[in-house]
Amino acid sequence: MLRVTLSGVESTGKSTLASELAVHFSGIVVWEFGRTYTEVSVRPLTLKDHHAIAEGHASHALDVAAKTPPVLIEDTDIVMTTAWATMLFGKRDPVLAARMSMADLHLLLLPDVPFVADRVRMFGDVAQRQRFHDVVVAEFAVRGLSPVQIGGSWAERRQRAIAAIEGKL
């Protein structure tokens, strides 16, 4: 089983691409636990909430991985949860930082597509979006991970992601 994680700031197409990749590779998606958690929350999230998001995502990912699909697509993982906490609280949390990513391949979607607002997205301003992207890139660097950067049009993103995954299979 190849475990692929999609990372990137808000509105870069992670969820849509995760669905497309799962169909293409007969895989299964582990959906972004943090989004679901945020949608049901009626208050600003705390650092403790981010710890719960990390735990919830990891638990769900283990359950899905037990089904041993040929390709497991994670719509974000601990890298993004840590980056979110850093962005929101101004410093890297050691509890989140200590959690390991389980991905065999990281795809980092670039913020080179238009932002689409919704009720939980927060960083749509161009400068904020770039700052958040920089936080994500820094999180990969401090973890010693080298993601494959995926940019361009929606079709180009799909094509590049498929090529990166095929290169690992």
Image: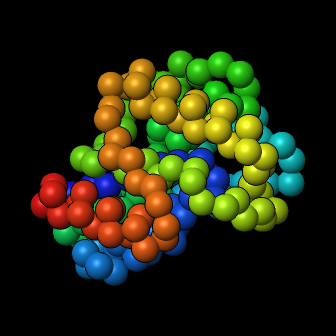
Q: How many marks?
A: 0
* Residue 30 in view, yes or no: no
Q: In this view, does 97 lie to the left or right of 1?
A: right
Between 168 and 54, the residue placed more toward the observer is 168
Query: Would you identify the image quadrant in which residue 86 lies?
Result: top right
Query: Would you identify the image quadrant in which residue 133 lies?
Result: top right
Q: Residue 29's x, y, as percent?
A: 40, 68
The answer to whether 104 is drawn above or below residue 92 in the figure is: below
Q: Residue 81's x, y, as percent?
A: 56, 40
* Residue 2 in view, yes or no: yes
Between 143 and 156, the residue placed more toward the observer is 156
Q: In this view, does 59 lie to the left or right of 80?
A: left
Residue occupying image coordinates x 73% and y 26%? 89
Q: In this view, does 120 lie to the left or right of 84?
A: right
Residue occupying image coordinates x 15% and y 55%? 168
Q: Colour mode?
A: rainbow
The answer to whether 89 is drawn above or below residue 123 in the figure is: above
Q: In this view, does 164 lie to the left or right of 82?
A: left
Residue occupying image coordinates x 77% and y 41%? 45
In the rendered image, the quadrant that contains the N terminus is bottom left
Q: Residue 157's x, y, as percent?
A: 41, 64
Query: Would you identify the image quadrant in which residue 128 lies?
Result: top right
Q: Residue 105's x, y, as percent?
A: 28, 48
The answer to whether 131 is drawn above or below residue 53 in the figure is: above
